[in-house]
Image (tube, grey):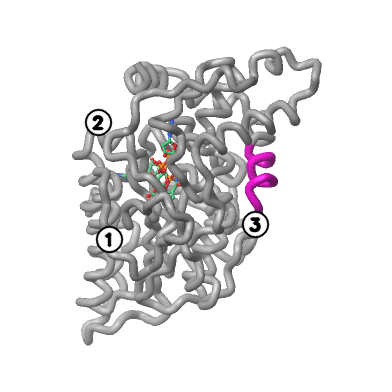
Amino acid sequence: MRTYLVTGGAGFIGSNYIHYMFKKYGDSIRIINVDVLTYAGNLENLKDIADRPNYTFVKADICDKEAIEKIFEENDIDRVVHFAAESHVDRSIKNPEIFVKTNVLGTAVMLNAARKAWEKEDGTYIEDKKFLHVSTDEVYGSLPDDDTAFFYETTPIDPHSPYSASKASSDMLVKAYIDTYHFPANITNCSNNYGPYQFPEKLIPLIINNALQGKKLPVYGDGKNVRDWLYVEDHAKAIDMVQEQGVIGERYNIGGHNEKQNIEIIRIILETLNEMLPDSDPRKAHINEELITYVADRKGHDRRYAIAPDKIKAAVGWTPDTMFREGIKLTIKWYFEHEDWMKNVTSGDYQKYYAEMYK
Ligand code: NAD
Ligand code: DAU
């Protein structure tokens, strides 16, 4: 039985990945999820699989070398899928240090522990051990307002925010391990994800939550920054395909050619909410474009992201299954059905964050 060590599995993409993997492989794999449970980590996201005999949760910090080495000593880990990170650009602008610590140092600890467990005396590795580093398209910087320009795997790294600089640094570390130690790893650089369990500091769940409550919808700058949105389950599928069928040592971009301006995303959400809510729902009265409020721009705001997914398609045959109009309906349906989840994550510290961020 193959054993996975997933880091950051209680976060948005990590929890969706764990659900996807159990749906796909059932009892034929084992997953150990290591997560320190920051504000973004939530065991509620995994409550329906928590009792599976082939699932284990370990509360630990990826920067804690002893704790991570202990997991490798006590388990024969075959796959590492490394999601754990500080992930929000706005928070990185206010407090960069924790991004450097978790995203750079934490990745170094993960790489060292895996290498220590897997490398043989002659410098080769125990057979069929693989490490996948989950990264972002933000490491490539920003594209001009020209819809023929794309990020390729060969695009030079040019990060602008402290978040993307820390992710670029961790990508470089993984590459250094591949080049120096022939470490069996892949790097994936994915575009913006959306879907169930996303924390409402990110654009799509924030807009859904605010619109339902009749609160203002904050749009940074002119609202014409472009992001390339991918349904989270398609990201999970891509990670698995790259890890099983990709060429060790290679980097793969993940994206579904779904570039949209932020203002278009907000309009689609408003339209879809109105389509999906019954006429008898009193919230329908306030869900309209009057809620849209232009606010100060994000510092160093990247203008446009757009992934060229040619390599992953050619190498492993990955293409996305869920188109945006369908994905956004699935996402809104999930938030309708999980009002308690939203209430729980937006109580307490979120209120303080929101008041400070959008003052
Ligand atoms: P998230 O913020 O929702 O989740 C991060 C998880 O990591 C949380 O469960 C948190 O508790 C955990 N964590 C943070 N610091 C930790 C530490 N020191 N030790 C152990 N666990 C720790 O993030 P996400 O959106 O799910 O992103 C996951 C990964 O995917 C990140 O590496 C991010 O850079 C990358 N990524 C995200 C997107 C996106 O659109 N969200 C797109 C491309 C790549
Ligand atoms: O591209 C992949 C990246 O996507 C991931 O690496 C990051 O972890 C993830 O957070 C995401 O980063 P972005 O900064 O692109 O996502 P965010 O949802 O924060 O913002 C999306 C766009 O919407 C961006 O142009 C800023 C804008 N925005 C965001 C918020 C929260 C607003 O206009 N208003 C808002 O209130």
Of 29 and 160, the residue lying toward us: 160
Which mark is in front, 1 or 2? 1
Visible in this render: residue 69?
no
Question: Helix, strand or loop at disc 2?
Answer: helix
Please report the residue visible at 27 percent of the width from the left and 77 percent of the height from the top: 119
- Residue 70 in view: yes
Ligand 2 within 8 Å of disc 1? The answer is no
User: Marks 2/3: CA distance?
Assistant: 38 Å
Return the disc, 2 or 3, that comes first in the chain's sequence.
3
> Residues under labels 3 and 1: Cα distance?
35 Å
Point out residue 161 in the picture as x, y percentages from the top left corner.
Answer: 27, 44
Q: Secondary structure at mark 1?
A: loop
Does 324 appear in magenta?
yes
- Look at the picture and state if 278 lies above or below 149: above
Residue tagged 1: 157
Q: Which residues are magenta?
A: 323-331
Mark 1: amino acid: Ile
Question: Where in the figure is residue 240, as x and y percent of width and height?
Answer: 52, 65
Task: Answer with the quarter of the image where residue 209 lies.
Answer: top right
Q: Position of residue 199 (x, y in %)?
A: 48, 34
Which mark is on residue 285?
none
